[in-house]
Amino acid sequence: MKLGGYVIHGNNRDTLGACLKSLLAVCDEVVALDSRSTDGSVELVREAGVRSVSRPWRGYGAARAAAMEELGACDYVFYLDSDEHLTPGAVHALQAWRASGPTAPAYLLPREDWAELDGHRFRYRTEWRARLVRRDKALWRPEMIVHEALPRMRAERLYAPIEHRFATSLEGRESKEERYALLWAVRAFAEGKRLKPAALQRPAHLIRDCLVHGALWRGGLDALRLAWAVSVYHSAKYRHLGALRRGAFPELRRAFSEGRYEEVFALVREQPRLPMAPGPVRNDRTG
């Protein structure tokens, strides 16, 4: 059984080395897709003996599809984000998985989200994510601009933990969640997804991460502050979707519908935050 692997990266030199080491430990071939980094990440990739391919950033779907095009023939694909790496036990678990003759369309691996806030390191939560996909099911399209893009499919769980450098600052995490939320909303609007009450989403997910996932017991007040920053995603995506339905972001909607995904990301970076409470809809470039 042949296993191909890839990582998509930008300026991620500080975490990319561990990611590449993990991929090389379990894969027969590894490709690193560079989205025009400037911090020496490409040189790090080449020093590791991994093939580097450069592409302009057009979103996760386009990047993952490009990585798949660069990989040779393989039975399964394993992919990590540039700020993820395998634990030593996970390497052994994946090697055993390869020898077992796997057949499922996809396998979910536990991803441990670690926070590093002012010298306080703690595990924020663990979520199961598809990271192993059978080659014939690993089909990404450019319109899949958001991070976890593959459609739902039958998947089995494989205990091979991935460590994820999830948050190093509250402000940076919240800003990232806001951008992801708007990207989600743009695609959701195009697909006609159902609108949910935005005001209920943030407290519900705060409780989920702090109490159900246990972040509060491991991280204390830092975990509570982080959960509040993270939970903005779940309310913001429906605030943005509601605004799109009322006619906001016309340039963004048009760029997405016309497949100009580089422009989609540029426009998202330019957007001011929407207010937490419903208010007047603003156009793309006017306050």
Image: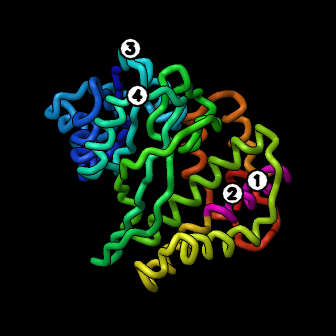
Secondary element at tag 1: helix
Reading the image, the residue beneath label 1 is: 241
Between disc 3 and disc 1, the foreground one is: 3
In whole angstroms, how far apart are the C-alphas of marks 3 and 2? 38 Å
Q: CA distance from mark 4 to mark 2?
A: 28 Å
**Residue at the spot of label 2:** 237
Magenta region, residue range = 233-247
Residue 73, given in percent of the width and then of the height, sits at: 38, 14
Q: Earlier in the sequence, mark 3 or mark 1?
A: 3
Q: Amino acid at mark 3?
A: Ala
In the picture, residue 124 is in which quadrant?
bottom left
What distance separates the C-alpha of mark 4 from that of mark 1?
A: 29 Å
In the rendering, at what x and y percent does residue 43 appear? Answer: 18, 35
Labelled disc at residue 171: none
The quarter of the picture where the N terminus appears is top left
The residue beneath circle 4 is: 55
Name the residue carrying label 3.
73
Residue at the (55%, 25%) spot, across then down: 137
Pair 3/2: label in front:
3
Marks 2 and 1 close (CB-CB < 8 Å): yes
Q: How many marks?
A: 4
Question: Crowding near pointer 1: few (<14 within 10 Å), some, many (20+)?
Answer: many
Residue that appears at 66% across and 62% down: 234
Disc 4 + disc 2, Cβ < 8 Å: no
SS assignment for the magenta stretch, majority: helix
Q: Is residue 237 magenta?
A: yes
Q: How many angstroms separate mark 3 from mark 1 (CA)?
A: 40 Å
